Amino acid sequence: MGDGINRRALLGAAAAAAAGSLALPAFAQAQNTVMQGTTQMEGPATTRSNVSSFRMLDWRNHFDNTRNGAILVDLTSRALHFWSEDQATYKLYPCSIPLSEDLTRRGRTQVVEMRENPSWRPTPSMRERNPEWPEVVQGGAPDNPLGVRALYLSWQYYRIHGTHDTRKIGRASSSGCVGLYNEHIVELYSLCKVGTQVLLI
């Protein structure tokens, strides 16, 4: 009898804990996993710790060194990893990725420019597809697609930037760029410099 009560109490507590977790906004749940760097091993009988399957990575598998810092964008898990030059700082952020394979670019590049509250101009191909779009959206505007910070890459038109539209994070939603929550791009911006290595896989 006592065992039955204890088992029911344990199951009830587990259900309540699960319900509490589900009641959190999706961002809060992802934030917990990402910022604490928690991971969960996956196997036939286990469940993923979050929808993007975030896992901490080792920079040595992707870079020869961390000179000037290193950014890895994993397009499959929709996550951006950052290692500081001295390897004392490691960050993992959820990100948005390009809408389709033809808009996606992979390989090595680097940060060539950094801007706070950048202005946004649609590319010629965007203007062709959407002639009604404005020629420019000024920095600081609430509808600016680049958010509050942007890291310009050596590839023309490609950026790592913030976004005011938080629904895009964790999704295939961009025209080629990598997007972060504004609070995350502000942090990443403070850690990067011109010359920071970038690899998209």
Image: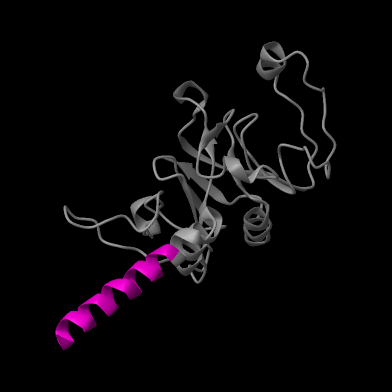
Q: Report which quarter residue 42 is drawn in.
A: bottom left
The residue positioned 77% from the left and 20% from the top of the image is: 133
The residue positioned 67% from the left and 56% from the top of the image is: 189
Q: Report which quarter residue 125 is drawn in.
A: top right
The residue positioned 19% from the left and 55% from the top of the image is: 43
Residue 37 x %, y %: 43, 66
Give the number of callouts: 0
Front-lying residue, 165 or 20: 20
Magenta stretch, main secondary structure class: helix
Front-lying residue, 100 or 50: 50
State which quarter of the image contains the C terminus: top left
Q: Outermost residue, front direction?
A: 1
Magenta stretch? 1-19
- 150 shown above or below 107: below
Q: Residue 14: within the magenta?
A: yes
Q: Report which quarter residue 45 is drawn in.
A: bottom left
- 119 shown above or below 185: above
Q: Outermost residue, bottom direction?
A: 2
The residue positioned 75% from the left and 49% from the top of the image is: 148
Front-lying residue, 33 or 195: 33
Left of 4 or right of it: where is 84? right
State which quarter of the image contains the N terminus: bottom left
Left of 3 or right of it: where is 12? right
Colour scheme of the rendered structure: one colour
Front-lying residue, 147 or 87: 147
Q: Residue 184: within the magenta?
A: no
Residue 69 x %, y %: 54, 58
